Image (tube, rainbow, N blue to C red):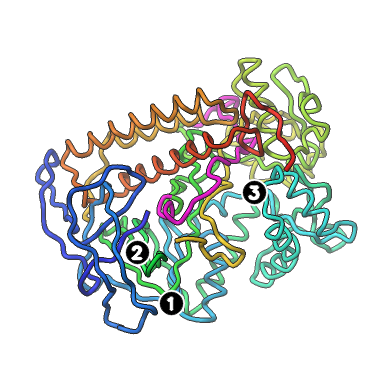
Amino acid sequence: MATSVASGSGQLHFQEAFLRGHGGKRAYTVRNIAVPLCMQKELSWCHGISKGLQINKSNYFQPHIKGECNLRRTVIRSYLREGHNKYFDFAVIGSGVAGLRYALEVAKLGTVAVITKAEPHESNTNYAQGGVSAVLSPSDSVESHMHDTIVAGAYLCDEETVRVVCTEGPERIRELIAMGASFDHGEDGNLHLAREGGHSHRRIVHAADMTGREIERALLEAVRKDPNIFVFEHQFAIDLLTSQDGSDTVCLGVDTLNTETHEVVRFISKVTLLASGGAGHIYPNTTNPQVATGDGIAMAHRADAVNMEFVQFHPTALADEGLPAKPKEARQNAFLITEAVRGDGGILYNMDMERFMPMYDERAELAPRDVVARSIDDQLKKRNEKYVLLDISHKPRDKILSHFPNIAAECLKHGLDITRQPIPVVPAAHYMCGGVRAGLQGETMSEVSTAEQLPQDEEVRRELQSIMWKYVGIVRSTTRLQKAEMRIGELELEWETYLFQHGWEPTMVGLEACEMRNLFCCAKLVLSSALARHESRAFTTWSTTPKSRKA
């Protein structure tokens, strides 16, 4: 999805309006903004799209932008006041490891705006536990790492990309250490290397079971010290600013909604980087934080999002139902149990304490995530159970507590001692393996005022998540996907009808409405991609063809 730049000086004119059914609450409708989204129906309104971008710095962009843009229906609600344009050489959307590392690099060349939806640390990176894989042992090799990666990727990986990532991995680790990241070391003084599923060697660099948190901390500290980087918190990215230069789509920046002041800010930049994370919250059970609603993927939908059917389900998230003391409130995201637990010797059992992984794969608990997640899913369905058990209690207590202090503390809060008892676990949506098509350098290959949350939003979100989990989960079939397609279409229509009946107009924007639209967009992308792939490969498993074909 993308917003075309309006005519004039780049400022959006706004008019005051009143919302029906909200006590005369004021809202502002943006007049000169066009927002193409995932919808199929054309809007009749159009206030005109510019044939050139004119801003105070007339030579800021080269070449001049030309062209028009088709409008599609959306729910936008905001206003842009005079003086709310901000100019930077680089705009980075997202404050996880990708966005922050990029910001630190390009800050050597110019000014950088890091735009983040919540607090800077609230990213998927911060929740990652296990570690980072890199070839750092004399007994390991880049070729072995590449082979493991390609096999785990079901032979769909781009080989050159895999080669670059595996070759440059050790240097990236050294860079993180130079920036202040502190990783665990062994008794010999060298980095402690763990082993995880799918890896044939010990190559996982980690900081206990809080590796992502440590990397995020180090990067944020480096960012705060850099005078060329400016961090903007609580800025929800509404749309990319784009225009046409012949057949090419040119990105000029991004419009954001400040979720605290309810004002729209326009960031105009020479380069815009999307590093906004995944869309785990299209599913009810996910390890992703609450902010992972697919905003970047939805915005870049017209920039050629690909392979969206590949949703990685982490095999072991904490199953609250199996805890001795249940959490008092439902979690916003599932608590991850790192696969390093299995790498350190953890064993999976069903509720009868029968070990089952050797029946599914010769690598047993060390099989790749997709194999383990499918195996657990099969056990749960065959036995009509809600979770399985992951046991590490046969290992020395001191080793367990030193390697997994965060997991041990979380479980102990709920009456479970992992040094003596098995951990109840269940698969949860984890990573979006597809996304915006990009090259090795990250270049893309194609192209308000806010009312209170409408109660319907939360109900619709739960229903969408339920449909995705039931019909577009770990194992899929054409019939189930078609049912999901029909139900999601009906649900989206019901939601839109509800919004417009309560006074929403096509030029209004609100945080919950934007998130809901992005979730619908990502869910439909996953669904349509899954329907187009009639084979079992990686994290897409068809009930009719359960075995992958080698590429």
Amino acid carrying label 1: it is: Asp
Q: Is any part of residue 46 visible from this angle?
A: yes
| Nearest to viewer (mark 2 / mark 1) | 2
- Mark sitting on residue 89: 1
**Nearer to the camera, 333 or 315:** 315
Specify the quadrant of the image occupied by residue 60. Answer: bottom left
Which SS class for mark 3? loop
Q: Mark 2 or mark 1, which has the lower sequence index?
A: 1
Q: Residue at x 35, y 42 (%)?
A: 516
Determine which residue is flagged by label 2.
241
Q: Residue at x 83, y 32 (%)?
A: 362
- For the view shown, which residue lies furthest in the front direction? 246
Between the C-alphas of marks 1 and 3, the distance is: 34 Å
Amino acid carrying label 3: it is: Gln
- Asked if the magenta segment contains residue 92, the reply would be no
Please tell me whether residue 161 is drawn above or below residue 89 in the rendered image.
Answer: above
Q: Mark 2 or mark 3, which has the lower sequence index?
A: 3
Between the C-alphas of marks 2 and 1, the distance is: 15 Å
Which SS class for mark 1? strand
Q: Position of residue 478 (x, y in %)?
A: 53, 26
- Looking at the image, residue 141 sits to the left or right of residue 494; the answer is right
Between the C-alphas of marks 2 and 3, the distance is: 35 Å
Q: Mark 1 or mark 3, which has the lower sequence index?
A: 1
Determine which residue is flagged by label 3.
129
Amino acid carrying label 2: it is: Leu
**Nearer to the camera, 136 or 422:** 136
Q: Are marks 2 and 3 in contact (CB under 8 Å)?
A: no
Give the magenta-colored segment's residue range: 298-327
Question: Quick one: label 1, few (<14), some, or many (20+) residues within 10 Å?
Answer: some
